[in-house]
Image (spheres, coloured by chain):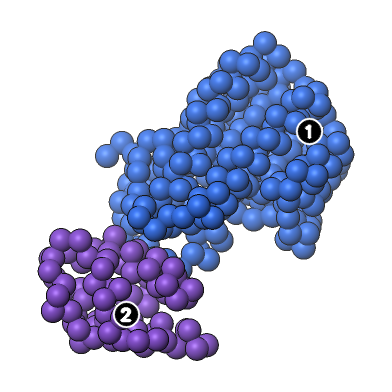
Chain colours: A purple, B blue
Amino acid sequence: MNIEKFVREFADQYDDISTENFTAETKFKENDEWSSMTALSVIAMVDESYSVRLTGDDVRKSTTIQDIYDIVSLKVNG
Amino acid sequence: MNNPFSLKGKNILVTGASSGIGKAIAITAAAMDAQLHITARNEQRLNETYNSLTGPGHTTHIADLNIDAETEALVTSVSKLDGVVLSSGIIKTLPFKFINEGELNAIMQTNFTSPVLLLSKLIKSKKLNSGCSIVFISSIGGNFVGAKGNAMYSASKGAINAIQKVLTLELAPQKIRVNNVAPGMVKTEMWENSTTFSAEQIEEDAKRYPLGYGETSDVANAVVYLLSDASKWVTGISLVLDGGFSVQ
């Protein structure tokens, strides 16, 4: 897995706000767009791109994109 | 007086009887003195339901209704019926932009195509007695409300309600009734095994139901009414079971 690619894939789940400045350290819930729908999209993206089942709880306990990346990495290698 | 809600002497087929709503319906209908003919894919779990049925005369039929030959075998082996409950179903939560052909076909096959084809074969084989009651387990989703991420499931349940209206008219001359129950969120294994939503999200969602989430017994009791002679003038309806959710 590649963190830069993952950040772009993650950012792609937002439709309204500018995500150009998104990095691994971006706190992905701290913006005007984040919602339960974005969470569903992130879960679906991870399933589609990495064949990994991210849970609603994984998203809830995560703060940065790096946090999600680390969970997905663990599951990909697990 | 005769209890009009009793199912005594009725032979009733329940699909998806190995878990959740289907299992609760089978157990409740047996308790109301029906003979149950239960079907599902998983033999061990279906036997667990079978062992929970009170009274004599029940049968089990292992079948994957997505496989035509297994549906045919079920239709051949089952006795003539006074009730059919179509309760097999799956769920998959995906934002609309992520739906794909494989997932869409799978959910439409299991929730719509397979139960409908089973019913068609039962009718063609003259397995339904006059006065038989058919009950689909539909949903408020796709019929009365939408829920984000629920496009595919909603489509499958909307299709059930569409076909029900036609069946109601086609089968009325034989006094066969066709009804739906339309539950909101019911606590089942299918839902608990879904990991898409966190416990906090589920707790928040439950607060949107004036009477809270439903239990499988809430659905089973409504289905017993629709199977019984108490509802002999009732056909073509969707009985909403949602603790007041959809009136808001």
Numbered mark located on residue B3 in the image: none
Quadrant for the N terminus of chain A in the image? bottom left
Q: What residue appears at the point 76 percent right and 30 percent down from the top-left corner?
A: B122
Q: Is residue B173 left or right of residue B184?
A: right
- The spot of residue A30 in percent (x, y) is 15, 74
Q: Above or below — where is B11 with respect to A76?
A: above
- The spot of residue B121 in percent (x, y) is 75, 31
Which of the pair B16/B170 is nearer the observer?
B170
Q: What residue appears at the point 53 percent right and 66 percent down from the top-left corner?
A: B193
Q: Chain of mark 2?
A: A
Task: Name the amino acid type tagged 2.
Answer: Phe
Task: Name the amino acid type tagged 1.
Answer: Asn
Q: CA distance from mark 2 to mark 1?
A: 56 Å
Q: Is residue B52 left or right of residue B162?
A: right
Q: Which residue is mark 2?
A: A6
- At mark 1, the secondary structure is strand
Q: Which residue is mark 1?
A: B11
- At mark 2, the secondary structure is helix
Q: What residue appears at the point 23 percent right and 86 percent down from the top-left corner?
A: A24
Is residue B54 visible to the viewer in this orientation of the structure? no
Q: Chain of mark 1?
A: B
Is residue A3 visible to the viewer in this orientation of the structure? yes
Q: Is residue B47 left or right of residue B233?
A: right
- The spot of residue A63 in percent (x, y) is 24, 82
- The spot of residue B213 in percent (x, y) is 42, 52
Rate crowding at label 2 as few (under 14), some (14 to 19) or many (20 or more) other CA atoms within 10 Å: many
Rate crowding at label 1 as few (under 14), some (14 to 19) or many (20 or more) other CA atoms within 10 Å: many
